[in-house]
Image: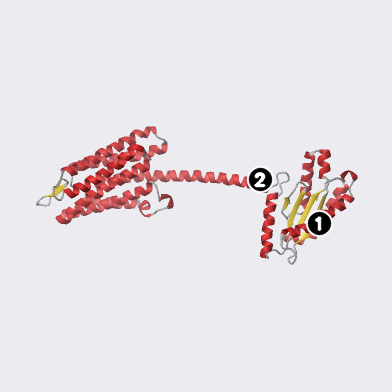
Amino acid sequence: MYYCLIDFLALLILLITNHDVLFTRGNAEAEGPQRSYRHFLYVVILYYITDLLWAWLYDISELDWLYVDTEVYFIVMAVGVLLWLYYVVIYLGIKGGFRKFLTYTGLVLLIVVVISTLVNRWCPVMFYFDAEGIYHAGIARDMIFVYQVIMLMVISLYTLVFVSTTTEKQRKRHLAIGLSGLTMMVFIAVQVFFPTYPLYAISYMLGSCLLRTFVIENEREEYRSNLEIALEREKEQFLELKSAWGLAYTDSLTGVKSKLAYAEKTELIDKQIERGSVEELAIAVFDVNNLKWVNDNLGHDVGDEFIRQACSLICTIFKKSPVYRVGGDEFVAILEREDYHNRAALLQAFNQEVEKNQRNDAVVIAVGMAEYKPMQDNSYKKIFERADVRMYKRKRELKADSFPAFDDS
Protein backbone atom coordinates (compact mmCIF):
# COMPACT_ATOMS: atom_id res chain seq x y z
CA MET A 1 0.00 0.00 0.00
CA TYR A 2 2.99 2.33 0.42
CA TYR A 3 3.20 2.42 -3.38
CA CYS A 4 -0.36 3.78 -3.63
CA LEU A 5 0.32 6.21 -0.79
CA ILE A 6 3.33 7.71 -2.54
CA ASP A 7 1.36 8.21 -5.78
CA PHE A 8 -1.54 9.73 -3.85
CA LEU A 9 0.72 12.13 -1.94
CA ALA A 10 2.58 13.07 -5.13
CA LEU A 11 -0.76 13.83 -6.81
CA LEU A 12 -1.89 15.98 -3.88
CA ILE A 13 1.39 17.90 -3.83
CA LEU A 14 1.15 18.59 -7.55
CA LEU A 15 -2.46 19.80 -7.29
CA ILE A 16 -1.72 22.01 -4.28
CA THR A 17 1.50 23.59 -5.56
CA ASN A 18 0.28 24.09 -9.13
CA HIS A 19 -3.40 24.84 -8.61
CA ASP A 20 -3.03 28.32 -10.11
CA VAL A 21 -1.36 26.95 -13.24
CA LEU A 22 -3.86 24.10 -13.63
CA PHE A 23 -7.11 25.89 -12.88
CA THR A 24 -6.49 29.59 -13.55
CA ARG A 25 -5.87 30.73 -17.08
CA GLY A 26 -5.16 34.30 -18.08
CA ASN A 27 -5.01 35.77 -21.56
CA ALA A 28 -1.28 36.36 -21.15
CA GLU A 29 -0.80 32.64 -20.59
CA ALA A 30 -2.82 31.48 -23.59
CA GLU A 31 0.41 30.95 -25.50
CA GLY A 32 4.00 30.19 -24.59
CA PRO A 33 5.85 28.26 -21.89
CA GLN A 34 3.17 28.27 -19.21
CA ARG A 35 0.61 26.65 -21.49
CA SER A 36 3.02 23.86 -22.45
CA TYR A 37 3.94 23.45 -18.76
CA ARG A 38 0.25 23.07 -17.90
CA HIS A 39 -0.17 20.38 -20.56
CA PHE A 40 2.81 18.55 -19.12
CA LEU A 41 1.21 18.67 -15.66
CA TYR A 42 -2.01 17.19 -17.02
CA VAL A 43 -0.09 14.17 -18.25
CA VAL A 44 1.76 13.89 -14.92
CA ILE A 45 -1.62 13.78 -13.16
CA LEU A 46 -2.75 11.04 -15.53
CA TYR A 47 0.50 9.19 -14.87
CA TYR A 48 -0.04 9.31 -11.09
CA ILE A 49 -3.57 7.97 -11.49
CA THR A 50 -2.38 5.19 -13.80
CA ASP A 51 0.49 4.30 -11.49
CA LEU A 52 -1.78 4.34 -8.44
CA LEU A 53 -4.22 1.98 -10.17
CA TRP A 54 -1.32 -0.23 -11.17
CA ALA A 55 -0.22 -0.61 -7.55
CA TRP A 56 -3.76 -1.35 -6.39
CA LEU A 57 -4.44 -3.89 -9.15
CA TYR A 58 -1.08 -5.52 -8.56
CA ASP A 59 -1.89 -5.82 -4.87
CA ILE A 60 -5.21 -7.58 -5.53
CA SER A 61 -3.75 -9.62 -8.44
CA GLU A 62 -6.34 -8.49 -10.98
CA LEU A 63 -4.11 -9.51 -13.90
CA ASP A 64 -6.38 -8.73 -16.85
CA TRP A 65 -6.93 -5.13 -15.86
CA LEU A 66 -3.37 -4.91 -14.56
CA TYR A 67 -2.02 -5.82 -17.99
CA VAL A 68 -4.08 -3.10 -19.69
CA ASP A 69 -3.12 -0.55 -17.04
CA THR A 70 0.56 -1.38 -17.54
CA GLU A 71 0.22 -0.71 -21.27
CA VAL A 72 -1.45 2.62 -20.55
CA TYR A 73 1.27 3.36 -17.98
CA PHE A 74 4.07 3.13 -20.55
CA ILE A 75 2.21 5.17 -23.18
CA VAL A 76 1.35 7.92 -20.68
CA MET A 77 4.98 7.92 -19.54
CA ALA A 78 6.19 8.42 -23.12
CA VAL A 79 3.67 11.23 -23.73
CA GLY A 80 4.88 12.90 -20.54
CA VAL A 81 8.48 12.77 -21.76
CA LEU A 82 7.46 14.26 -25.12
CA LEU A 83 5.57 17.15 -23.48
CA TRP A 84 8.39 17.78 -21.04
CA LEU A 85 10.84 18.05 -23.94
CA TYR A 86 8.44 20.32 -25.80
CA TYR A 87 8.21 22.55 -22.72
CA VAL A 88 12.01 22.65 -22.39
CA VAL A 89 12.61 23.83 -25.97
CA ILE A 90 9.93 26.53 -25.65
CA TYR A 91 10.96 27.71 -22.20
CA LEU A 92 14.68 27.87 -23.01
CA GLY A 93 14.06 29.21 -26.50
CA ILE A 94 16.15 26.46 -28.09
CA LYS A 95 16.43 26.88 -31.85
CA GLY A 96 17.87 25.08 -34.82
CA GLY A 97 19.14 21.53 -34.94
CA PHE A 98 19.15 20.90 -31.19
CA ARG A 99 15.46 21.82 -30.99
CA LYS A 100 14.67 19.29 -33.72
CA PHE A 101 16.84 16.70 -32.02
CA LEU A 102 14.98 17.02 -28.72
CA THR A 103 11.56 17.03 -30.36
CA TYR A 104 12.36 13.98 -32.50
CA THR A 105 13.86 12.26 -29.45
CA GLY A 106 10.50 12.49 -27.67
CA LEU A 107 8.59 11.40 -30.77
CA VAL A 108 10.89 8.41 -31.33
CA LEU A 109 10.43 7.35 -27.70
CA LEU A 110 6.63 7.55 -27.99
CA ILE A 111 6.62 5.56 -31.25
CA VAL A 112 8.95 2.90 -29.82
CA VAL A 113 6.78 2.56 -26.69
CA VAL A 114 3.55 2.22 -28.69
CA ILE A 115 5.07 -0.37 -31.03
CA SER A 116 6.72 -2.29 -28.17
CA THR A 117 3.46 -2.29 -26.24
CA LEU A 118 1.60 -3.76 -29.20
CA VAL A 119 4.32 -6.35 -29.86
CA ASN A 120 4.31 -7.23 -26.16
CA ARG A 121 0.92 -8.91 -26.54
CA TRP A 122 2.59 -11.63 -28.61
CA CYS A 123 6.21 -11.39 -27.43
CA PRO A 124 6.94 -10.05 -23.90
CA VAL A 125 9.62 -7.52 -24.82
CA MET A 126 8.26 -4.89 -22.42
CA PHE A 127 6.88 -6.86 -19.47
CA TYR A 128 4.98 -9.96 -18.42
CA PHE A 129 3.30 -11.47 -15.38
CA ASP A 130 4.14 -15.03 -14.39
CA ALA A 131 1.68 -17.61 -13.18
CA GLU A 132 1.87 -16.24 -9.64
CA GLY A 133 1.12 -12.70 -10.83
CA ILE A 134 4.66 -11.40 -10.31
CA TYR A 135 5.67 -8.53 -12.58
CA HIS A 136 8.80 -9.01 -14.72
CA ALA A 137 10.47 -6.30 -16.81
CA GLY A 138 11.47 -6.97 -20.39
CA ILE A 139 14.53 -5.84 -22.33
CA ALA A 140 12.58 -3.19 -24.26
CA ARG A 141 11.32 -1.68 -21.02
CA ASP A 142 14.88 -1.43 -19.66
CA MET A 143 16.15 0.09 -22.92
CA ILE A 144 13.36 2.69 -22.82
CA PHE A 145 14.36 3.74 -19.33
CA VAL A 146 18.03 3.86 -20.30
CA TYR A 147 17.04 5.95 -23.31
CA GLN A 148 15.34 8.45 -20.99
CA VAL A 149 18.34 8.54 -18.66
CA ILE A 150 20.66 9.38 -21.56
CA MET A 151 18.27 12.00 -22.87
CA LEU A 152 17.98 13.66 -19.44
CA MET A 153 21.75 13.59 -19.05
CA VAL A 154 22.20 15.34 -22.41
CA ILE A 155 19.67 18.05 -21.52
CA SER A 156 21.12 18.53 -18.03
CA LEU A 157 24.66 18.86 -19.37
CA TYR A 158 23.50 21.24 -22.07
CA THR A 159 21.65 23.51 -19.64
CA LEU A 160 24.28 23.47 -16.92
CA VAL A 161 27.15 24.11 -19.34
CA PHE A 162 25.35 27.18 -20.69
CA VAL A 163 24.61 28.56 -17.21
CA SER A 164 27.87 30.52 -17.10
CA THR A 165 27.51 31.95 -20.62
CA THR A 166 23.91 33.25 -20.61
CA THR A 167 22.20 36.34 -19.25
CA GLU A 168 20.83 36.39 -15.70
CA LYS A 169 17.34 35.59 -16.96
CA GLN A 170 18.53 32.68 -19.12
CA ARG A 171 20.87 31.50 -16.36
CA LYS A 172 17.95 30.95 -13.99
CA ARG A 173 16.01 29.09 -16.66
CA HIS A 174 18.89 26.80 -17.59
CA LEU A 175 19.63 26.09 -13.95
CA ALA A 176 16.01 25.16 -13.21
CA ILE A 177 15.79 22.75 -16.15
CA GLY A 178 19.21 21.30 -15.42
CA LEU A 179 18.45 20.57 -11.75
CA SER A 180 15.03 19.07 -12.46
CA GLY A 181 16.52 16.97 -15.27
CA LEU A 182 19.32 15.65 -13.06
CA THR A 183 16.85 14.78 -10.29
CA MET A 184 14.57 12.89 -12.65
CA MET A 185 17.55 11.16 -14.27
CA VAL A 186 18.80 9.74 -10.97
CA PHE A 187 15.46 8.26 -9.95
CA ILE A 188 14.71 6.87 -13.41
CA ALA A 189 18.17 5.24 -13.49
CA VAL A 190 17.44 3.52 -10.19
CA GLN A 191 13.99 2.53 -11.48
CA VAL A 192 15.69 0.33 -14.08
CA PHE A 193 16.90 -1.99 -11.32
CA PHE A 194 13.81 -1.78 -9.10
CA PRO A 195 10.80 -2.14 -11.41
CA THR A 196 8.20 -2.47 -8.64
CA TYR A 197 9.25 0.67 -6.75
CA PRO A 198 7.45 4.02 -7.32
CA LEU A 199 10.69 5.78 -8.22
CA TYR A 200 9.39 7.24 -11.47
CA ALA A 201 6.52 8.85 -9.56
CA ILE A 202 9.02 10.29 -7.07
CA SER A 203 11.10 11.66 -9.96
CA TYR A 204 8.04 13.44 -11.33
CA MET A 205 7.14 14.77 -7.88
CA LEU A 206 10.60 16.23 -7.20
CA GLY A 207 11.07 17.41 -10.79
CA SER A 208 7.74 19.25 -10.88
CA CYS A 209 8.43 20.80 -7.45
CA LEU A 210 11.78 22.10 -8.71
CA LEU A 211 10.13 23.46 -11.84
CA ARG A 212 7.49 25.11 -9.72
CA THR A 213 10.01 26.67 -7.37
CA PHE A 214 12.48 27.91 -9.96
CA VAL A 215 10.46 28.28 -13.15
CA ILE A 216 7.00 29.50 -12.25
CA GLU A 217 8.16 31.77 -9.43
CA ASN A 218 10.95 33.17 -11.61
CA GLU A 219 8.43 33.75 -14.38
CA ARG A 220 6.22 35.68 -12.01
CA GLU A 221 9.12 37.74 -10.77
CA GLU A 222 10.06 38.51 -14.37
CA TYR A 223 6.43 39.37 -15.10
CA ARG A 224 6.27 41.73 -12.11
CA SER A 225 9.55 43.33 -13.14
CA ASN A 226 8.39 43.73 -16.74
CA LEU A 227 5.08 45.11 -15.52
CA GLU A 228 6.86 47.72 -13.39
CA ILE A 229 9.01 48.70 -16.37
CA ALA A 230 5.93 48.90 -18.60
CA LEU A 231 4.06 51.02 -16.05
CA GLU A 232 7.03 53.35 -15.67
CA ARG A 233 7.29 53.64 -19.45
CA GLU A 234 3.56 54.31 -19.67
CA LYS A 235 3.89 56.98 -17.00
CA GLU A 236 6.71 58.64 -18.94
CA GLN A 237 4.65 58.49 -22.14
CA PHE A 238 1.67 59.99 -20.31
CA LEU A 239 3.82 62.85 -19.02
CA GLU A 240 5.23 63.39 -22.50
CA LEU A 241 1.72 63.36 -23.95
CA LYS A 242 0.51 65.71 -21.24
CA SER A 243 3.42 68.02 -21.98
CA ALA A 244 2.73 67.86 -25.71
CA TRP A 245 -0.94 68.46 -25.05
CA GLY A 246 -0.07 71.48 -22.94
CA LEU A 247 2.16 72.86 -25.67
CA ALA A 248 -0.49 72.32 -28.32
CA TYR A 249 -3.35 73.83 -26.32
CA THR A 250 -1.44 76.69 -24.69
CA ASP A 251 -0.26 79.83 -26.42
CA SER A 252 3.50 80.01 -25.92
CA LEU A 253 3.69 83.80 -25.73
CA THR A 254 0.86 84.61 -23.34
CA GLY A 255 0.07 81.34 -21.55
CA VAL A 256 -3.66 81.46 -22.39
CA LYS A 257 -5.41 78.88 -24.50
CA SER A 258 -4.22 78.42 -28.08
CA LYS A 259 -5.94 78.67 -31.43
CA LEU A 260 -6.22 74.86 -31.55
CA ALA A 261 -8.05 74.84 -28.20
CA TYR A 262 -10.31 77.61 -29.53
CA ALA A 263 -11.17 75.60 -32.65
CA GLU A 264 -12.16 72.59 -30.53
CA LYS A 265 -14.22 74.77 -28.19
CA THR A 266 -16.15 76.38 -31.05
CA GLU A 267 -16.80 72.95 -32.53
CA LEU A 268 -18.17 71.79 -29.17
CA ILE A 269 -20.41 74.87 -28.90
CA ASP A 270 -21.79 74.20 -32.40
CA LYS A 271 -22.74 70.67 -31.32
CA GLN A 272 -24.37 71.99 -28.15
CA ILE A 273 -26.34 74.57 -30.16
CA GLU A 274 -27.47 71.81 -32.53
CA ARG A 275 -28.67 69.73 -29.56
CA GLY A 276 -30.34 72.75 -27.99
CA SER A 277 -28.34 72.43 -24.77
CA VAL A 278 -26.94 75.99 -24.79
CA GLU A 279 -28.83 78.52 -22.68
CA GLU A 280 -26.35 81.08 -21.39
CA LEU A 281 -23.41 82.06 -23.58
CA ALA A 282 -21.66 85.30 -24.53
CA ILE A 283 -18.55 86.00 -26.56
CA ALA A 284 -16.11 88.85 -26.08
CA VAL A 285 -13.81 89.56 -29.05
CA PHE A 286 -10.66 91.63 -28.43
CA ASP A 287 -8.18 93.34 -30.74
CA VAL A 288 -5.05 95.15 -29.54
CA ASN A 289 -4.69 98.65 -30.97
CA ASN A 290 -1.41 100.08 -32.26
CA LEU A 291 0.51 96.74 -32.35
CA LYS A 292 1.81 97.33 -35.89
CA TRP A 293 3.18 100.76 -34.89
CA VAL A 294 4.90 99.26 -31.84
CA ASN A 295 6.49 96.44 -33.89
CA ASP A 296 7.67 98.78 -36.65
CA ASN A 297 9.04 101.50 -34.41
CA LEU A 298 10.04 99.80 -31.16
CA GLY A 299 10.78 96.22 -32.29
CA HIS A 300 9.07 92.88 -32.02
CA ASP A 301 10.36 92.20 -28.51
CA VAL A 302 8.52 95.26 -27.28
CA GLY A 303 5.56 94.16 -29.42
CA ASP A 304 5.53 90.78 -27.68
CA GLU A 305 5.54 92.49 -24.29
CA PHE A 306 2.71 94.71 -25.56
CA ILE A 307 0.67 91.57 -26.37
CA ARG A 308 1.41 90.04 -22.96
CA GLN A 309 0.23 93.24 -21.23
CA ALA A 310 -2.96 93.21 -23.28
CA CYS A 311 -3.56 89.56 -22.40
CA SER A 312 -2.96 90.29 -18.71
CA LEU A 313 -5.59 93.01 -18.76
CA ILE A 314 -8.15 90.73 -20.44
CA CYS A 315 -7.49 87.89 -17.99
CA THR A 316 -7.69 90.25 -15.01
CA ILE A 317 -11.19 91.43 -15.90
CA PHE A 318 -12.53 88.18 -17.36
CA LYS A 319 -10.76 86.02 -14.82
CA LYS A 320 -13.46 83.34 -14.62
CA SER A 321 -13.74 82.84 -18.39
CA PRO A 322 -11.43 80.89 -20.71
CA VAL A 323 -9.37 83.29 -22.84
CA TYR A 324 -8.00 82.27 -26.24
CA ARG A 325 -5.38 83.92 -28.40
CA VAL A 326 -6.75 83.42 -31.91
CA GLY A 327 -4.39 85.66 -33.87
CA GLY A 328 -1.37 87.90 -33.51
CA ASP A 329 -3.23 90.59 -31.55
CA GLU A 330 -6.68 88.99 -31.37
CA PHE A 331 -8.22 87.32 -28.33
CA VAL A 332 -11.58 85.76 -27.52
CA ALA A 333 -13.19 85.18 -24.12
CA ILE A 334 -16.15 82.82 -23.85
CA LEU A 335 -18.45 83.82 -21.01
CA GLU A 336 -20.59 81.23 -19.25
CA ARG A 337 -22.31 80.91 -15.89
CA GLU A 338 -21.19 83.69 -13.45
CA ASP A 339 -19.30 85.78 -16.02
CA TYR A 340 -22.28 85.55 -18.35
CA HIS A 341 -24.58 87.02 -15.72
CA ASN A 342 -22.05 89.76 -14.94
CA ARG A 343 -21.20 90.45 -18.59
CA ALA A 344 -22.46 94.04 -18.63
CA ALA A 345 -20.46 94.98 -15.56
CA LEU A 346 -17.37 93.20 -16.87
CA LEU A 347 -17.62 94.95 -20.22
CA GLN A 348 -17.97 98.34 -18.50
CA ALA A 349 -15.03 97.64 -16.18
CA PHE A 350 -12.86 96.56 -19.10
CA ASN A 351 -13.64 99.65 -21.17
CA GLN A 352 -12.91 101.89 -18.19
CA GLU A 353 -9.47 100.31 -17.81
CA VAL A 354 -8.79 100.68 -21.53
CA GLU A 355 -9.78 104.36 -21.46
CA LYS A 356 -7.50 104.89 -18.47
CA ASN A 357 -4.64 103.18 -20.37
CA GLN A 358 -5.28 105.36 -23.38
CA ARG A 359 -4.83 108.47 -21.28
CA ASN A 360 -1.60 107.05 -19.85
CA ASP A 361 -0.15 105.86 -23.20
CA ALA A 362 -0.51 102.20 -22.13
CA VAL A 363 -1.97 99.24 -23.96
CA VAL A 364 -5.33 99.85 -25.63
CA ILE A 365 -7.71 97.04 -26.55
CA ALA A 366 -10.97 97.17 -28.45
CA VAL A 367 -13.69 94.77 -27.32
CA GLY A 368 -17.02 93.71 -28.73
CA MET A 369 -19.51 91.44 -26.98
CA ALA A 370 -22.51 89.45 -28.19
CA GLU A 371 -24.91 87.02 -26.49
CA TYR A 372 -26.33 83.78 -27.82
CA LYS A 373 -29.92 84.16 -29.07
CA PRO A 374 -31.66 80.75 -29.27
CA MET A 375 -34.20 81.79 -31.91
CA GLN A 376 -31.62 83.53 -34.08
CA ASP A 377 -28.25 81.79 -33.76
CA ASN A 378 -27.84 78.33 -35.28
CA SER A 379 -24.04 78.33 -34.98
CA TYR A 380 -21.18 79.84 -33.03
CA LYS A 381 -20.21 81.86 -36.10
CA LYS A 382 -23.40 83.94 -35.90
CA ILE A 383 -22.59 85.06 -32.35
CA PHE A 384 -18.97 85.76 -33.22
CA GLU A 385 -19.89 87.91 -36.22
CA ARG A 386 -22.04 90.22 -34.09
CA ALA A 387 -19.30 90.49 -31.46
CA ASP A 388 -16.71 91.16 -34.16
CA VAL A 389 -18.76 93.98 -35.68
CA ARG A 390 -19.10 95.64 -32.26
CA MET A 391 -15.38 95.21 -31.64
CA TYR A 392 -14.47 97.06 -34.85
CA LYS A 393 -16.92 99.81 -33.99
CA ARG A 394 -15.23 100.19 -30.62
CA LYS A 395 -11.82 100.10 -32.32
CA ARG A 396 -12.76 103.04 -34.53
CA GLU A 397 -13.98 104.97 -31.50
CA LEU A 398 -10.70 104.42 -29.68
CA LYS A 399 -8.65 105.37 -32.74
CA ALA A 400 -10.58 108.59 -33.08
CA ASP A 401 -9.49 109.55 -29.59
CA SER A 402 -5.90 108.30 -29.93
CA PHE A 403 -2.72 110.20 -30.68
CA PRO A 404 -1.82 110.77 -34.37
CA ALA A 405 1.29 108.62 -34.01
CA PHE A 406 -0.92 105.54 -33.63
CA ASP A 407 -3.10 106.10 -36.71
CA ASP A 408 -1.67 103.13 -38.69
CA SER A 409 -2.42 100.43 -36.09
Residue 33 coordinates in the image, percent (x, y): 38, 46
| Residue at image mark 1 | 389
* Image-based side of 302 in relation to 65, left or right: right
Circle 2 Cα neighbour tier, 10 Å, few/some/many (<14 / 14–19 / ≥20): some
Residue under the point 30% across and 44% down: 207
Closer mark to the observer between disc 1 and disc 2: 1
Distance in Å between CA atoms under marks 1 and 2? 31 Å
Q: Earlier in the sequence, mark 1 or mark 2?
A: 2
What residue is drawn where x is 87% and y is 45%? 406
- Name the kind of residue labelled 1 in the image: Val
- At label 1, counting other C-alpha atoms closer than 10 Å, the crowd grade (few under 14, some 14-19, many 20 or more) is some
Q: Which mark is residue 165?
A: none
When the figure is inspected, residue 325 is found, relative to residue 178, above or below; the finding is below
Considering the numbered disc 2 on the image, is that residue within a helix, a strand or a loop? Answer: helix
Q: Residue furthest bottom?
A: 375
Check the image and tell me how it is coloured: secondary structure
Kind of residue indicated by mark 2: Leu
336 shown above or below 245: below
Instruction: Report the side of 160 relative to 225 (left or right).
Output: left
Asked which quadrant contains residue 156, the reply is: top left
Considering depth in this image, is 245 or 41 the residue closer to the camera?
245
Of residue 337 and residue 117, the one placed in the foreground of this image is 117
Q: Is residue 396 visible?
A: yes
Residue 30 location (% of width, % of height): 40, 51
- In this picture, residue 151 sits left or right of residue 280: left
The reply to whether residue 214 is visible in this rendering is no
Residue 247 is marked as: 2
Q: How many marks?
A: 2
User: Could you say whether the residue bearing mark 1 is in a helix, strand or loop?
Assistant: helix
